């Protein structure tokens, strides 16, 4: 039987930075299912409700709770773990928080990435590295034209700038130090859309805000209901990162820095209001919705990603459409908050969603699943 990603992660030592976060916990669970020896490096989880809080400690070979900006600690962890591939997800991921903590946002995202790459240089760690940035790394003129990987990087807000800066850090370290060094591995960056899915309880994100309103029956406040985003389930972005990792492990080319968009099809580029309306179909409830007439910070009104390069080069494609994405996300939270599900049940359900996603990808004959 063919296993996902050509079974390349079976027995591999994998380090996930940011493993306590939303994406990191899903990534760790999926890698464990793929047979990898998973280790993690991250700050403690921001919420006791997070998906990470449900995971059994023995899922991880080693779990280091520390700041990615602690270069000595990070280097020591990499030296002990000896990863064959690193998925670098550790970041300050919230736009709203970046206005309150601009220096922390910049140093965590850009400097933290530089310290990771310097750690690999110092200990001559020949491992592949996939650095995760964001769809917001592009200079956005609100035209609505989906961004391609060749478009200019930039950002008028600190969060977007920090992601663009992270891309520049990887590019400069690649050309200056990694490209011609036989002791180091291949580098790549992945840029995903607006990710939703179970287990996210961050502040100032639409799905966690929806869940809190549903549970408390308090008003949901929308900052910009007509702003459009490329919504995608967390598994879509992770399948992209894993496909990229498969490429680095199976056909490493240190001469080339790979960067790919992993976004949904155009149909999933919907407004915030449309997401709320679709959510209401999957988890009906009664609570009021208000619009914030004076949002605390500026955001782009239009954002889209062109994933054609990933399709042509990696064979990667989106699996779930907008309706399925919202349905799968709502089902996870509804089970947890209405069904009184145990920890074991929630982890089993999360695993079942991964299995369902893989099966749907295989049915669509997407290369990584066949």
Image (cartoon, grey):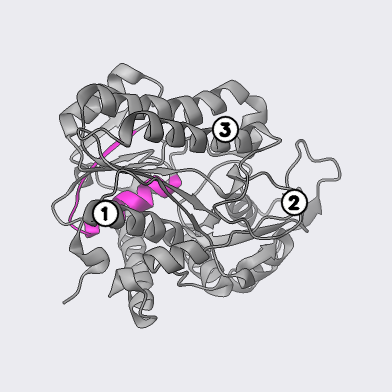
Q: Place residue 8 in its image quadrant.
A: bottom left
Q: Which residue carries the number 2 mark?
A: 222
Whole-percent x, y for residue 336 in the image: 45, 58
Q: Is residue 148 visible?
A: yes
Residue at 80% over, 53% down: 290
Mark 1: give few (<14), some (14-19) or many (20+) Cα within 10 Å: many
- CA gap between label 1 and label 3 equals 28 Å
Nearer to us: label 2 or label 3:
3
Which residues, given as a range, are shown in magenta? 22-41
Whole-percent x, y for residue 315 in the image: 39, 69
Q: Which residue carries the number 3 mark?
A: 162
Give the quarter of the figure containing the C terminus: bottom left
Q: Which residue carries the number 1 mark?
A: 31
Who is closer to the viewer here, 185 or 330?
Answer: 185
Mark 3: give few (<14), some (14-19) or many (20+) Cα within 10 Å: many
Q: Which numbered disc flags the more N-terminal residue, 2 or 1?
A: 1
Whole-percent x, y for residue 106 in the image: 55, 26
Give the quarter of the figure containing the N terminus: bottom left
Secondary structure category for the residue under label 1: helix
Q: Is residue 178 left or right of residue 133?
A: left
Q: Which numbered disc flags the more N-terminal residue, 1 or 3?
A: 1
């Amino acid at each position: 039987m063919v296993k996902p990603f050509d079974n390349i992660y079976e027995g591999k030592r994998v380090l996930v930075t940011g493993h306590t976060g939303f994406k990191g916990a899903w990534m760790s669970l999926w890698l464990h299912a793929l047979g990898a020896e998973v280790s993690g490096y991250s700050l403690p989880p921001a919420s006791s409700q997070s998906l990470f809080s449900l995971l059994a400690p023995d899922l991880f070979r080693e779990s280091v709770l520390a700041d990615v900006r602690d270069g000595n600690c990070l280097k020591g962890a990499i030296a002990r773990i000896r990863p064959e591939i690193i998925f670098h997800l550790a970041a300050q991921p919230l736009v709203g928080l970046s206005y309150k903590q601009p220096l922390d946002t910049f140093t965590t995202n850009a400097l933290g990435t530089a310290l990771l790459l310097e750690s690999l240089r110092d200990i001559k760690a020949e491992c592949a590295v996939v650095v995760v940035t964001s769809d917001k790394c592009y200079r956005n003129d609100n035209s609505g034209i989906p961004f391609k990987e060749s478009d200019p990087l930039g950002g008028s807000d600190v969060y977007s700038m920090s992601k663009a800066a992270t891309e520049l850090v990887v590019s400069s370290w690649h050309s200056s130090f990694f490209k011609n060094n036989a002791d180091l591995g291949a580098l790549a960056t992945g840029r995903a859309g607006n990710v939703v899915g179970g287990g996210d309880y961050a502040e100032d994100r639409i799905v966690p805000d929806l869940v809190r309103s549903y549970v408390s029956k308090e008003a949901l406040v929308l900052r910009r209901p007509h702003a459009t985003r490329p919504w995608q389930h967390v598994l879509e972005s992770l399948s992209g990162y894993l496909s990229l990792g498969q490429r680095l492990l199976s056909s490493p080319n240190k001469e080339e820095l790979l960067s790919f968009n992993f976004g949904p099809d155009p149909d999933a580029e919907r407004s915030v209001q449309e997401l709320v309306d679709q959510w209401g179909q999957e988890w009906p409830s009664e609570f009021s919705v208000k619009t914030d007439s004076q949002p605390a910070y500026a955001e782009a009104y239009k954002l889209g990603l062109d994933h054609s390069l990933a399709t042509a080069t990696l064979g990667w494609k989106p699996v779930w459409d907008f309706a399925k994405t919202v349905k799968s996300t709502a089902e996870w939270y509804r089970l947890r908050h209405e069904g009184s599900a145990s920890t074991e049940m929630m982890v089993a359900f999360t695993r079942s969603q991964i299995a369902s996603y893989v099966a749907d990808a295989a049915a669509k004959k997407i290369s990584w699943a066949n």
